[in-house]
Image: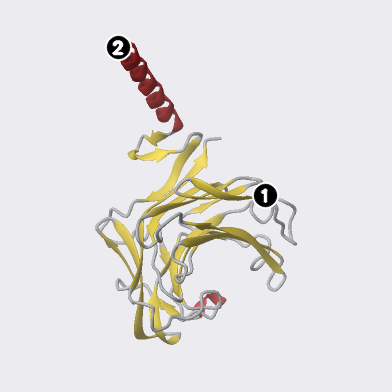
Amino acid sequence: MQKVILGGFIWILILSFCKSGNSSTDPDHPNIPVPPGFQLVWHDEFDLSVINQEKWNYDINAWGGGNNELQYYTDRFANAFIDKGFLVIRAKKEHYTGPEGTREYTSARLHTKNKGDWTYGRFEIRARLPFGQGIWPAVWLMPTDNKYGGWAASGEIDIMELLGQEPGKVYGTLHYGGEYPQNVHTGDDFFLPQGSFYENFHVFSLEWDTTAISWFVDDSLYQTQSQWYSENGEYPAPFDQQFHLIINVAVGGNWPGNPDETTPFPQDMVVDYVRIFQKKD
């Protein structure tokens, strides 16, 4: 019995040592685990009382993102705010008139362009997602300088998209090739084993390297892509330039369809943190 107990104790020590070797912490932020071989380069824990505009920009428009979406993106507190350490992006059903016209829905789209721009890295976003027919939350990366031309010759990386009528399924997608309509896209989806993404928080991660891009949900790898192209550059173009991060909740559009009588409002995307790491070398 004593031998078994001693052996178990030693095994626990070995497991603890191995676990501690799998991650470290940033010296300036000891509560943030850092993947091995990486360093923390940008993050927002949403611990201020307001959205940090040194890190985030607002898109303000009613043009529907080119997808026939129905929302008016605003910079109002009603659509994007900090609540008890969480970023809340709220889609509302309301009659709203702004400089670009009138819409029956409002929401918010935040981005880091020229405040957070990266080539390669690991992106981690912990969030609880909204749901309902026609609700379309997304976390994605767009090129900062469009080095290879207009969309999608310069690429687009979708870390996470969800169609609200499929609340247990998320998508990860690359857009590339030529300028519209000569663009193509490739990707895959991830199903929760049980439950829906609006019930609990989940971590959506992407690792982007020179010749491979991988997608994870709660550290479960569900796809890796290594084949893409741009008509205006040699491989690994277009995914060899700076991209910035976008977080938004769209309402309606070509892909999700429009809300209907079953769609409850308001709908919230609640973000716990955003963390970006890059390899030390």
Mark yes or no: residue 50 visible: yes
User: Residue 160, how many percent across, how many down?
Assistant: 50, 59
Q: Residue at x 67, y 56 (%)?
A: 238
Which amino acid type is shown beneath numbered disc 2?
Gln
Looking at this view, name the residue that lies furthest to the front. Answer: 1
**Quadrant into which the C terminus falls:** top right
Which amino acid type is shown beneath numbered disc 1?
Ser
Cα distance in 3D space between marks 2 and 1: 53 Å
Q: Residue at x 46, y 59 (%)?
A: 112
Which colour scheme appears in the figure?
secondary structure
Q: Nearer the viewer, residue 191 or 51?
A: 191
Above or below: residue 112 compared with residue 9: below
Numbered badge on residue 276: none
- Name the image quarter holding residue 249: bottom left
Q: Secondary structure at mark 1?
A: loop
Relative side of 145 to 3, left or right: right
Q: Secondary structure at mark 2?
A: helix
Above or below: residue 180 compared with residue 173: below
- Name the image quarter holding residue 28: top left
Q: How many marks?
A: 2
Give the residue number, with chain letter if any, for mark 2: 2
Q: Which numbered disc, 2 or 1, marks the residue that appears first in the sequence?
A: 2
User: Residue 49, how many percent across, how many down?
Assistant: 25, 59
Looking at this view, name the residue that lies furthest to the top. Answer: 3
Relative side of 153 to 220, left or right: right
Give the residue number, with chain letter if any, for mark 1: 226
